[in-house]
Amino acid sequence: MTAGFMKRSNQSREGELCGLMELKKRKLLEETDLFVLDMDGTFYLGDKLLDGALEYLEAVRAAGKEFIFFTNNSSKSPRLYLDKLKRMNCHITRRQIMTSGDVTIQFLKTYYPEKKVYLVGTDALEESFAESGIHLTQRSPDIVVVGFDITLTYEKLEKACTFIRNGAMFLATHLDINCPAEDGFIPDCGSLCAAITLSTKVEPRYLGKPFPETVEMVLRQTGVPRERIAFVGDRLYTDVATGVKNGAKGYLVLTGETKREDLADAVIQPDAVFESLKEMGTYLEEMMTEKRLAI
């Protein structure tokens, strides 16, 4: 068997695999009615909109499908995210955005409505908690909640550890270890919780993605069946895992934390991998064009 024949044979098999992968992506997109989109690392990076992101939203709308944003980043309130998206020429309603802070507030109101909470979080998160009727305190709390606190001080850290050692429940808005930034990554909520756990020997109960409370909130708000929902993002252990672990779909985009080479040893495997939202939007546009031509 000649080297040339083997090369052509390998190229043929690679072409067949690519064709099968493309068909799988199209089928999955056809079966998706609601895209739950991550934000930082997926739709934008820092204050910079990612290429093709707005065009992707237009493709979703043109295909008769829906989208909402869900971010684990609890450092900002939904109102601040709405303002940020507006500055990027992305105009949505309050019902089209959820945060891990929203999930945590709902969890507290449902299961611990009378409990006092010590919050390690930004002013924006504290404002959201207070507006929702959460009883915040600086003394003898029943629960310590840790968010992505970019205003963290040693005093806050020390108080959280002391309260937890004294028996307070330990909750966290989300488990993300790092937050993508334009110059790399910065420590996120999971990193802050790791420091508290190292000191107290107590593990937190995490909310946000990829946990069931997030999916249940999306289901209640949208009414879309979970099997017709896809969670889209740049992280396997949060964005993708939310879908694949909870009866929905998980699509990975390679514009943030996860790189293609990370998939080889990953425990969580996405249903589909896209280079970006731009590529996903191109698929949707092509599918709509084919449908129109078939009429």
Image (spheres, rainbow, N blue to C red):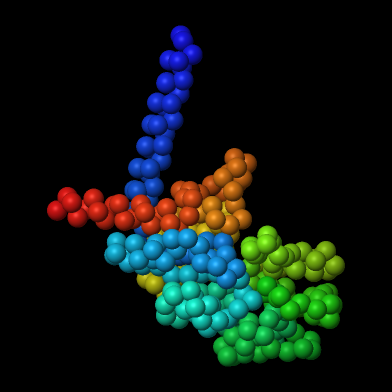
Any part of residue 194 in sight: yes
Residue drawn at 83 percent across, 68 percent down: 200
Q: Quadrant of residue 114?
A: bottom right
Where is residue 139? Give x, y as percent: 79, 89
Q: Is residue 198 left or right of residue 210?
A: right
Where is residue 171? Give x, y as percent: 68, 73
Q: Quadrant of residue 99?
A: bottom right
Where is residue 47? Give x, y as percent: 57, 71
Total marks in image: 0
Up/down of 77 relative to 100, above or below: below
Q: Is residue 149 left or right of residue 64?
A: right
Q: Is residue 30 left or right of residue 194?
A: left
Residue drawn at 53 percent across, 77 percent down: 84
Frontmost residue, 283 versus 25: 283
Q: Is residue 209 left or right of residue 197?
A: left
Any part of residue 248 in sight: no
